[in-house]
Amino acid sequence: MNTENVDILIIGAGPSGSVAAGYLHKQGAKIKVVEKQKFPRIVVGESLIPRVMDHFNEAGLFEALNSYGFEKKPNARFIRGKEDCIFDFSNKFGEGWDWTWQIPRADFDKAMTDELQRKGVDIAFETEVINVEFNGTDSITTIKNKEGNLSEIHAKFVIDCSGYGRVLPRALKLEAASSLDPHSAIFSHIKDINRTQKTNGDTQISFDILETEVWLWVIPFSNGNTSVGIVGPTAYINSLSETNNNAEALKKAIGKSVYYKERFGDLPFEFDPIRLTNYSVAVTQFYGDGYALTGNSTEFLDPVFSSGVCFATESGILAAKLALRQINGETIDWQKEYAEYMQYGIDVFTTYVKEWYTGNLQELFFHRPENPDVKRKICAVLAGYVWDKDNPFVTKHHNIIKNMAYMIKENKMDS
C-alpha cells in the first residue's frame, strides 16, 4: 500500500477546505486535500455574506475568484406581502466588507480548487476516506481512489472540512442533535428569462416570507440563472406534494408568492429539484487530539441568513492557523481559541434564526418608521460580523430582539 507523509491533511475541498488549503500553502506547509466528489457538483449555499471576503482574501483566493464576474451582493432584501426591508451592507455598524457574491456553487467551488491546483496544492478528487486512526496527534488515514486503490496518508494534523459528509463526526461518533426545530428545503435553478434590468432590483437576493415560518429564497446569478428554494417546517414541506414530488412541491411554493409567481411560475427547472430534509446538525465537540472539525462538519443552522459558508470559511482558516502553530511546536488552547470562539458566533446566529421563526425578528425588520441605528447593528450581524463585541446586537443577542419585538407589539396594541 502506498504511503504519503504530510503536515496537514484536509478532508473536503469546499469553501472551508479551500481557504484552509490556500492559507496553509501560502505558509509553506506540506498539505494534501482529499475530496470524495468530482467537481463541479451541485450543492446548496449559493448566497455568501461579506465576512467571507476576509477569508478568501487571506487565503490568497480573492483575486482569482473576482475575475469570474460572479454576481455582486451589496445587500439583502426581505419581502412580506407588500412590505419590503433592504439591508445595505455599506450602511452597517462597524468595519468590514460592504459586499460579497451570489454564486452557483458548482462553478464557485471549482474556481477555488482550480486556483489552488494552479498554485500547486495537491488535491485528490473522487477519493474517499475509508478509515482514520489517531496516535496522539499523529494520524493514519486510509483513502480509496476512483479506481478502488487504497493508500495511506500519515499526517501530523487532520482538518475535517467534509461538510455534510461529516467524515470524522461519524467515524468518531461525535454527532449530536441540533437545538433548532426540524426544517427542510427544496431548491433548483431556473433560467431567469423574465429578469429585467438591474435598475429594477431583479438581481437582488430576496427572502420572500409566505408564512411566519415559511419563506422562498431567490438568488440571481450573473450567468442568467436564478436559484429558487422553499424553506419551512418539515411537515409543511412534505405537505406541498402528496407524492413527495419535489418539482410539484417547489412549483406549488412559487405559486404562493405574490411577488415571484409571475416571474418564475411557468418556467422549467434546470435540474430536478433537490430536497434537504431536517438539515440542521451539530456535534458534541469541535476538536480532539490531532484534528479539528470545520463548517458543516460541526454545525449547520439554517439557510435564512446565508451563514453556512461563513461559518465554514471562518472555522476553516482559523483551524488552519492553529494547526500550523501546533505542528510548529506551540501549545494551543483549542478550547478557548477555537471551540469557544466558534461557538460564540454560532450562538449569536442561532438566536437570530430562532427569533426569525418566532416572528420576533420579522417584527423588527418590517417595523415602521425604521430605526436607522438598530438597522445598522442588525445589518452587521447579517453581514457575518458576529464576533464584534462592540455591537450590542451581538453581545445582548439572547434578549435584545425578543425585548424590542415585545415593545413593538405592545405599542401596536396601545395604538
Image (tube, rainbow, N blue to C red):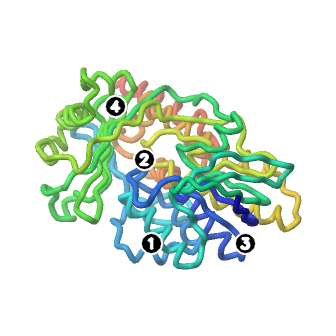
Q: CA distance from mark 2 to mark 1?
A: 36 Å
Marks 1, 3: nearer the viewer? 3
Return the residue at label 3.
Answer: 29
Q: Tell whether label 4 touches label 3 (CB within 8 Å).
A: no
In terms of secondary structure, where does tag 3 sit? loop
- Say which amino acid is labelled 1: Leu
Q: CA distance from mark 4 to mark 1?
A: 33 Å
Task: Give me the disc on residue 313.
Answer: none
Q: CA distance from mark 3 to mark 2?
A: 49 Å
Residue 127's x, y, as percent? 56, 56
Packing grade of label 2 (10 A; few <14, some 14-19, many >=20) is few
Q: CA distance from mark 2 to mark 4?
A: 26 Å
- Say which amino acid is labelled 2: Asn
In which image quadrant can residue 208 be found? Answer: top left
Residue at the image position 54 percent from the left and 65 percent from the top = 96
- Say which amino acid is labelled 4: Val
Say which label, 4 or 1, has the lower sequence index.
1
Marks 2, 1: nearer the viewer? 1
In which image quadrant can residue 304 be found? Answer: top left
Return the residue at label 4.
Answer: 214
Residue at the image position 37 percent from the left and 53 percent from the top = 76
Residue 326 is at least partly visible in this image: yes
Residue at the image position 60 percent from the left and 34 percent from the top = 398
Q: Is residue 292 above or below residue 120?
A: above
Say which label, 3 or 2, has the lower sequence index.
3
Q: Tell whether label 2 touches label 3 (CB within 8 Å).
A: no
Return the residue at label 2.
Answer: 371
Packing grade of label 4 (10 A; few <14, some 14-19, many >=20) is some
Task: Give me the disc on residue 65.
Answer: 1
